[in-house]
Amino acid sequence: MNQISIAVDNIIQVLETYDSIKVYSAPSQNGTYAEISTPSTRPVLHSYEQVYWFTDGAGTSTTWYKTSYFNSTTLVESSLSAAVLGASGSGKVGYSFGNYSAPPNEWGKIVTADDLRYTYMWGIDCTAKDIAESDMEDSQFDFYIRGALRDFEIYLTTDIAKHVYMTNPIDTLNQSDDGFWRAGVDYTDEEDSYDFDPLQWGNWGFISLRHAPVISIERAQMYSPVRNMVLDLLKTGWVRLNKKTGRVNLYPTGNLPYGPFIAPSGVWRYFGMRYPNGFEFDYTTGYKTSNQVPEGLRQVIAKWAVIKALQSVGDGLLAGFSSQSVSLDGLSESFSSTQSATSAYFGARIKSYQEEVKDWMQHNRYKFGKIPLGFVGV
């Protein structure tokens, strides 16, 4: 497999004519090049992005590549670029190398294993002192990255990765087995319904969804106390959504009156009566792809992942080792590490990152998460 990095220096000028990139490959430098990208996998050009990447699952160290700019509407295509050997790159893939982007139909990775290994853990040998001298694999780094991402979703009380919530989903739908969305998954989390509250209904139908930020609402329905659907709120166009906070207001369109006097829906019969399971919402939250996560948030999650990883790496290098001395015929040699029962081997790096994470949380927590409010009655 080859990761192909495509740099676009004059992106604004290119966007005046083209909107995507075609990728071609050949078995030799002067061979016949055929397109290996498809309409769904061609990298899409954006004004804010100058480096794009493409994954060739069948690529080898001897595969050669060329690229071109393409307009999917006018079908205009530029000339092919110079040939590049698949093995000519550094092999490192990540945001810090400017060559990672979320694959089509995937959410992507908030940081990659190479970001951690070669940037945030620079200078640290992630090799265990076993007989095989095993290196920490990408899957192990990905495990810590996913854990750090989930931790920050809890700390910030906000969704970062893409979540799809469904209320009362049917059994034939496919739920993610690990809570992470990917192509082919219908939903990641099951959502509870919302109560009908007369006070909220009278306040422009105010409902605060349990999760935010909201990308889109796929279903919004109102039910009577006996579980009959009385309003399809999306079809009527009543839904007013604040995506950042997840606040939904329900306000009628057209000439329909608002409040308890909506005779066609029968809502007037229930106004003034609070009852459970009055509303059901299916909705999607988080950032659309990992590319759109703010850089500061991405970096602090990466540092938290490193803290998790270094605790294991330190034990793998010098498990239970603090100091050692050897003497022979008057000559002596001693070695001491920072590792002890209360200090990890990479304690300095861990402590530095812990302080940076703490400082970031103090200054940014409520920028991304919800602000806690307290009320005192008099």
Image (cartoon, helix red, strand yellow):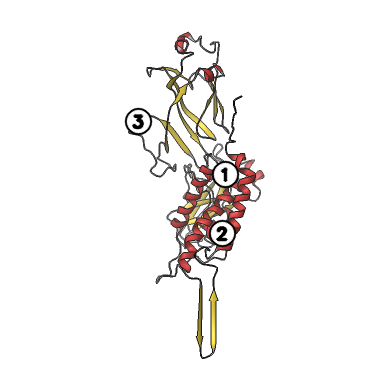
Specify whether 174 is left or right of 102. Answer: left
Helix, strand or loop at label 2? It is helix
What residue is shown at x 49% (from left), y 65% (from top)? 341
- Residue farthest toward the bottom in the current orientation of the protein: 329
* Label 3 crowd bin: few (<14), some (14–19), many (20+), radius 10 Å: few
Q: Which residue position holds label 3?
A: 170
- At label 2, which amino acid type do we have? Ile
Q: Are marks 2 and 1 in contact (CB under 8 Å)?
A: no
Total labels: the figure holds: 3
- Mark on residue 293? 1
Quadrant including the C terminus = top right
Specify whether 155 is left or right of 59. Answer: right
Residue placed most toward the observer, 146 or 38: 146
- At label 1, which amino acid type do we have? Val
What residue is shown at x 54% (from left), y 88% (from top)? 331
Residue 262 in the image, given as x and y percentages of width and height:
49, 10
Helix, strand or loop at label 3? It is loop
Residue placed most toward the observer, 64 or 78: 64
First along the sequence among labels 1 and 3: 3
Q: CA distance from mark 1 to mark 3?
A: 32 Å
First along the sequence among labels 2 and 1: 1
Query: Is residue 14 in sight in this rendering?
Result: no
Q: Which residue position holds label 2?
A: 350
* Label 1 crowd bin: few (<14), some (14–19), many (20+), radius 10 Å: some
Specify whether 51 is left or right of 62. Answer: right
Q: CA distance from mark 3 to mark 2?
A: 46 Å
Specify whether 166 is left or right of 375. Answer: left
- At label 3, which amino acid type do we have? Ile
Helix, strand or loop at label 1? It is loop
